Image (cartoon, helix red, strand yellow):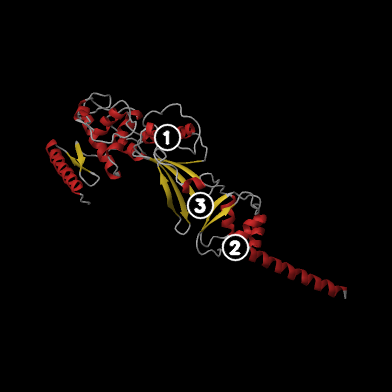
Amino acid sequence: MWRSIASNALTLFIVVLVLAAGLLAWGREQFGGPGPLEQAICFRVERGDSLSAVSRALEEQGAVSDARIFRIGADYSGKADDLKFGSYLVLPGASMAQVLEAITVGGQSTCGREVNFRISVARAEVVLRQLDPATNRYVEVVAFDPATEAAPAEYVAVAEADDIRWRVTLAEGVTSWQVVDALRRAEFMSGEIAEVPPEGTLAPDSYEVTRGADRAALLALMAERQAATLAELWANRVEGLPYDTPEEALIMASIIEKETSVPEERRRVSAVFVNRLEQGMRLQTDPTVIYGVTRGEGVLGRGLRQSELRRETPWNTYVIDGLPPTPIANPGRLSIAAALDPEESDYLYFVADGTGGHAFARTLAEHNENVARWRAIERERGEAEASGVQD
């Protein structure tokens, strides 16, 4: 009898173990397998939310199939207490394990709203964007120039939110004065800027910041990044360049940056200036003259006068020989690379061609023909504007 009872108990114990193992395997499959979400969502974890509240919200929004399994998986993996406040992108088919990873490990919102303070040559503007989960792309909500426009209601309503991502984007070709002037108007930043950094030493790039970030610290990061880029590219420069220091290369890069916005032209423009330097010709480039007039403090906003082309300033390359004494803007990586690896060509001249690019020439006669064509294009455009005709 006892032998029978023991046998039955052992059998029952084995069955229970098998069932438990099966249940555990099923739970693991549910936790690690593809989730039920059909369309991406932006899931928000509120400050102070409990795991129970989060798991229920995930189930209600269709991101997980079972809130209890999600909680058990979080406990089992030791992440139950690691929830991070913010908004997170949950992709279609994301497993419970992937959802848990997103809301506990990242610690940085990957969804929701972003404010990008874009500093360009023409203006600095605050852009509020919202991520569209369906396309995983940001959609612009509102934009304004803090120098001339009041903050719109859409921006004011969300500017104090804790989960807003903040970014400062510096465009290629802006001057250091323009950067400092814009940052001083960035109300979401703090701290004083003692002086304008040397021209050319700030790296055009996109910088993620936090609300209240120190302005001087951001400028230091920009300078550190530019110095690293210059050092890297200088170390890999081609031989025989007509400048001897990284600083001279940076000056050349700034001129290239201001002369063309077409990436494919940068090395060719660089070749023109290198060829002119090697032949003892003056660079004769308008952007350097403009810098001599403005000192980088804003945009000239008009054409150059003949008197300005003749005026002697340290930057007027129609008057001086060689390179100007400083950069005339903050060049990007592509322009620095072009200055240190120009295209192999014998071009000595270029002028705008009406398409956004330039026509290049080897001789002055060819160049004069290109200039004549450009002048004709300018006249046609002027006549069209005068008559109200649109392209």
Per the image, label 2 sits on a secondary structure element best described as helix
Work out whether mark 3 precedes mark 2 in sequence or the reverse, and give the earlier one. Answer: 2
The quadrant where residue 275 appears: top left
CA neighbours of label 2 inside 10 A, class few (<14), some (14 to 19), many (20+): few
Q: 330 left or right of 23?
A: left
Q: Position of residue 77 (x, y in %)?
A: 65, 54
The residue positioned 46% from the left and 32% from the top of the image is 220
Can you tell which mark lies on residue 368?
Answer: none
How many badges with numbers are in the image?
A: 3
Question: Measured from the top left, where is residue 204 in percent x and y?
Answer: 39, 38
Q: Earlier in the sequence, mark 2 or mark 1?
A: 2
> As rendered, which of 194 and 151 lies closer to the eye?
151
Are dots 1 and 3 in contact, CB under 8 Å? no
Q: Is residue 346 visible?
A: no
Residue 385 image offset from top left, x and y in percent: 20, 46
Q: Amino acid at mark 3?
A: Gly
Could you tell me the amino acid type at mark 2?
Glu
* Element marked by disc 1: helix
Q: Which residue, given by chain and number where applicable, does mark 3 sit on? A: 112
Residue at image mark 1: 228
268 lies left or right of 67: left
Q: CA distance from mark 1 to mark 3?
A: 33 Å
Q: Which residue is mark 2?
A: 60
Front-lying residue, 386 or 305: 386
Tell me which label, 1 or 3, sits earlier in the chain.
3
